Amino acid sequence: MRKFNYEDWDIEPELETGNDDFVFGNYVDWDRFRQDEEENLLAYFDIQLPWGEELFLSEYFELLRQEVFQNTSIVEDCDLDKLEITTQSNIISEMVIQFPRRKDSKSDEIISAVFDYYGIPSGTEYEHELPEKLKYWNNMLENGYLESEYENYRKYPLKFGTYKKTISEIALKVSNTSDTLTKKALILSSFIISESLLKSAIVSKIPKETAISKFSKEILSKEIDNRLRGSVNKRNELFKQLFNEKAPKQEWINLRNSLAHDIESSTIQGNEISYISFIDHKEYPVNFDNLFKQQMDFYKKLQKIMKNDDE
């Protein structure tokens, strides 16, 4: 059976940014894609839906032989087996059936079920959910727009003011949206931004070497980059070496790992998100307000450490 392949389509993701133009990443509104490309998608899968037409019984039965109707319950679920007979006849082959019009109440349900069958995504997918080629950051890396993390954070550090505004904005979005998957994606993005703040702090402390060769600079850059991209422990160790002080607590790490590994495994009830820890396999609930307070406390402690270090 042929399935939907996004690479066969010219899909242009939209860019999600904050008030300060901080880039969260790409997202694709698949429902809008379905709507805009409806006719092309039906042609792509060679699906015949003769909206509003009158069909002889033989044509109707031929229509129902299409794979999508044979392998699903669309006919029964969408009342395609209860269509109006517009022309009666003693000869069965001369009987005529009215196929639904596109604007009829069940038509959207038919289209949705057909597209689901062929694996066309629905809803909105954000950066971490998208195929690699549709991701903003992946494309930036592939096209050479991004240097190593070390060089990138040296040139474009995340400022404390930007961080505070962005986290506050994400917290507001989480509060205002009712979609659980969107809430999870926003929470995960806040963790990524918190990681960026810590990385920016680390890089700001690394002295820029000018009296070494280009080759040595590349080795230094790669080594620092590996530690920035590495585990939380590696980053925290590097922070302690540079500041002679422990990095502020990042109490959300277990939740972050759970969301990054399988975003659908966590559940949201009211103002709490619950997840299964990879460490002890127990379930832990986290209050949204506490979660964002933890990140603001992290930001304040990190800012204090850097301020003391400058004195």
Image (cartoon, rainbow, N blue to C red):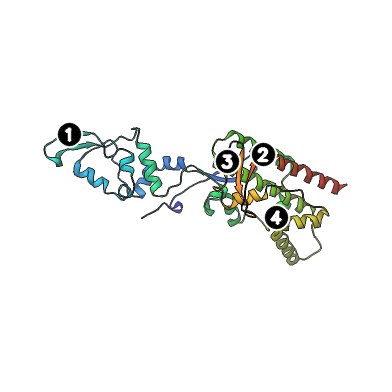
* 174 shown above or below 245: above
Q: Amino acid at mark 2?
A: Asp
The residue mark sitting in front, 1 or 2, is: 1
Label 1 sits on residue? 87
In this orientation, which residue lies closer to the viewer: 104 or 79? 79
Name the residue type under label 3: Ile
- Is residue 3 visible in the rendered image? The answer is yes
In the visual, does 273 lie left or right of 222?
Answer: left
In which quarter of the view is residue 97 placed?
Answer: top left
Whichever of labels 4 and 3 marks the residue nearer the N terminus, that label is 4
* Residue that sits furthest to the right in the current view: 311
Check whether the beta carbons of the residues at disc 2 and disc 3 lie within 8 A of each other: no
The reply to whether dot 1 and dot 3 touch (C-beta < 8 Å) is no
Distance from disc 2 to disc 3, alpha carbons, whole Å, reads 29 Å
User: Which is more toward the observer, 64 or 199?
Assistant: 64
CA neighbours of label 4 inside 10 A, class few (<14), some (14 to 19), many (20+): some
Callout 1 amino acid: Thr
Q: CA distance from mark 1 to mark 2?
A: 64 Å
Q: Residues within 10 Å of mark 1 (few under 14, many from 20)?
A: few
Label 1 sits on a secondary structure element that is strand
Which residue is disc 2 drawn over? Answer: 20
Q: CA–CA distance between discs 1 and 3?
A: 53 Å
Query: How far is mark 4 from mark 2, CA to CA?
Result: 27 Å
Comes first in the chain, label 2 or label 3: 2
Q: What numbered label is drawn on residue 232?
A: 4
Foreground: disc 2 or disc 3: 3
Percent x, y for residue 14? Answer: 54, 43
